[in-house]
């Protein structure tokens, strides 16, 4: 089954500031490990959530506007699509990811089969 | 349908079916598919066996047929085609799917653990397990959980959808996940035993297959993880099971604990149960099952009903209530207090529980009130409580017992 691992951060969480949060090297090391395991279908890292552009159907036309959006507390920092046997394996990878370290969490979503 | 076919199919009813379902589910990794295939195989047996004769091993025949039916479905259905890749032949499977650790050595126990998976909602887990692993009907599950049938149905549908969408594995968890998951499994084994011990429907009071299966599973769990609570559960089931020969008359009518011929209790089980109960009570982490085992041990040690140390039982119930403040435990405590300190005190505690909605439909509560009311000399109240108990669903053997009790008060409703 395919699962999306969404690596989430929290803008206000002090543990995910300049220090205390998982370091980029941790993410690189995890990326090497999960890629070497052969379960990655695709993966991505996102630029800073402050450069976000937002679209919204305001009734007449879709509006695009730039951030930041103060009301958003959580953001997706990056993600993986992995193909593993079952949710246990997906959970095991999510636990290993630095995204699960203090200040962040990993959301596991099965890909819908259509 | 021929008699032989009917008998052979009845023989694989509760126990065999849930075993079959566990095997099929592990092989296909899909509960719905396994369930449909098993139904198809049972239907096929109704057609085939009267002509071909009952096969030597009906369970093996049903397994093979169900597997073939499931494969047909998978091949026919394009959406399910990907599942074909996931099918694993029993023989080709590594004995240990989850890596280097020791796996749970039992199909059904593996499925129990799968159903306690943390991604399932806690309230859905037990319903799911009783229904599919315990082989109980939705009505029986509803009774075991003191929950309306419609609610149970919803929970099962929701849990099945979640299992499918999330890809919850039907394989035993890794050994290091066992301690986290064991509580839910213990509870289901306990409920399974309870349902077998006093049936919620049907003719018989006791279902020996269910209790035997619960004891088997409890032994397996105890071997797997000998904690205070697994030891306590096993002790509790053994000590309760030991009373089996004295629990019903030759006609199958239940005999209350006080009236049981204690010489007919099974000595071997008592000896084993007492040793386990003692070890459970003395272990770190002793909880509800260890306490309940201690209560059963106090009963087992009394030579006659009058010798029972009710004040110790009342103390144990108070400890139990700290762990489980639920209404059923409070009924047990009220009875113990009544025996230890007089029926009036017991009745006070029971009357305090009358507003509990869960107890309104709980037969033992009304029976306990009836007995206590009779003891304080309130015959009308006792008769009313017996009548209320009779109105509630239960097995017919128990109905007969209640009708007899009601007769003693010379007050039987005209159409019962």
Image (tube, coloured by chain):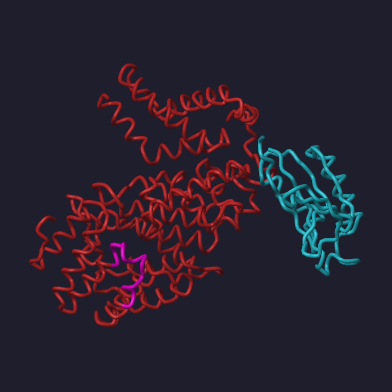
Chain colours: A cyan, B red
Q: Is residue B281 left or right of residue B365?
A: right
Q: Residue A58, position in %: x, y?
A: 74, 52
Q: Residue furthest front?
A: A60
Residue B69 position (above or below residue B254): above
User: Looking at the image, which is closer to me, B110 or A45?
Assistant: A45
Residue B96 position (above or below residue B262): above
Q: Residue furthest top?
A: B51
Q: Residue B179, position in %: x, y?
A: 60, 58
Q: Quadrant of the N terminus of chain B?
A: top left
Question: Which region is colored magenta?
Answer: B352-365
In the image, residue A14 lies in the stretch drawn in magenta: no
Q: Quadrant of the C terminus of chain B?
A: bottom left
Quadrant of residue B83 in the image?
top right
Residue drawn at the location 69% of the way across and 43% of the way down: B99
Counting the numbered discs, the total is 0
Residue B212 position (above or below residue B83): below
Q: Is residue B67 left or right of residue B257?
A: right
Quadrant of residue B52 in the image?
top left
Q: Is residue B261 left or right of residue B103?
A: left
User: Looking at the image, which is closer to me, B150 or B329?
Assistant: B150
Q: Residue A104, position in %: x, y?
A: 78, 60
User: Looking at the image, which is closer to me, B354 or B251?
Assistant: B354
Residue drawn at the location 31% of the way across and 63% of the way down: B362
Residue B141 position (above or below residue B42): below
Q: Is residue B88 visible?
A: no
Q: Is residue A112 visible?
A: yes
Q: Residue furthest left?
A: B410
Q: Residue A33, position in %: x, y?
A: 84, 45
Residue drawn at the location 41% of the way across and 58% of the way down: B272
């Amino acid at each position: 089954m395919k699962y999306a691992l969404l690596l989430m951060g929290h803008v206000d969480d002090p543990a995910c500031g300049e220090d205390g949060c998982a370091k980029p090297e941790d993410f690189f090391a995890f990326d090497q490990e999960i890629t070497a395991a052969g379960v990655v279908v695709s993966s991505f890292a996102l630029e800073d959530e402050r450069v976000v552009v937002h679209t919204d159907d305001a009734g007449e036309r879709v509006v695009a506007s730039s951030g930041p959006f103060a009301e958003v507390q959580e953001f997706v920092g990056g993600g993986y699509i992995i193909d593993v046997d079952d949710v246990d394996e997906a959970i095991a990878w999510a636990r290993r990811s630095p995204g699960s370290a203090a200040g962040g969490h990993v959301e596991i979503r099965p890909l819908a089969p259509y | 349908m021929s008699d032989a076919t009917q008998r052979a199919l009845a023989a694989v009813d509760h126990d065999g079916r849930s075993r079959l379902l566990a095997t099929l589910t592990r092989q296909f990794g899909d509960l719905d598919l396994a369930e449909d295939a098993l139904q198809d195989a049972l239907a096929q047996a109704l057609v085939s066996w009267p002509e071909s004769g009952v096969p030597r091993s009906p369970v093996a025949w049903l397994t093979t047929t169900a597997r073939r039916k499931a494969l047909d479905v998978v091949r026919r259905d394009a959406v399910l085609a990907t599942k074909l890749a996931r099918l694993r032949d029993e023989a080709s499977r590594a004995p240990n799917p989850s890596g280097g650790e020791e796996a749970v050595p039992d199909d059904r126990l593996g499925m129990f653990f799968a159903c306690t998976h943390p991604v399932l909602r806690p309230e859905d887990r037990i319903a799911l397990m009783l229904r599919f692993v315990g082989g109980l009907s939705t009505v029986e599950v509803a009774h075991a959980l003191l929950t309306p049938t419609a609610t149970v149905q919803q929970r099962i549908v929701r849990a099945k959808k979640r299992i499918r969408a999330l890809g919850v594995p039907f394989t035993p968890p890794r050994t290091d996940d066992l301690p986290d998951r064991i509580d839910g499994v213990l509870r289901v084994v306990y409920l399974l035993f309870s349902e077998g011990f006093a049936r919620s429907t049907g003719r018989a009071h006791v279902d020996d297959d269910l209790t035997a299966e619960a004891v088997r599973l409890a032994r397996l769990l105890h071997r797997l993880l000998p904690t205070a609570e697994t030891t306590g559960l096993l002790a509790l089931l053994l000590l309760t099971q030991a009373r089996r020969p004295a629990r019903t008359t030759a006609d199958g009518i239940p005999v209350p604990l006080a009236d049981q011929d204690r010489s007919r209790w099974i000595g071997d089980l008592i000896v084993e149960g007492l040793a386990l109960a003692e070890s459970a009570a003395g272990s770190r982490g002793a909880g509800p099952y260890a306490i309940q085992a201690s209560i059963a041990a106090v009963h087992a040690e009394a030579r006659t009903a009058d010798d029972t140390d009710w004040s110790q039982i009342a103390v144990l119930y108070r400890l139990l209530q700290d762990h489980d403040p639920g209404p059923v435990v409070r009924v047990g405590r009220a009875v113990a207090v009544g025996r230890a300190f007089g029926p009036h005190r017991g009745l006070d505690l029971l009357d305090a529980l009358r507003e509990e909605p869960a107890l309104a439909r709980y037969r033992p509560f009304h029976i306990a009130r009836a007995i206590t009311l009779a003891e304080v000399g309130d015959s009308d109240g006792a008769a009313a409580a017996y009548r209320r108990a009779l109105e509630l669903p239960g097995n017919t053997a128990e109905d007969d017992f209640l009708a007899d009790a009601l007769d003693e008060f010379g007050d039987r409703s005209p159409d019962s």
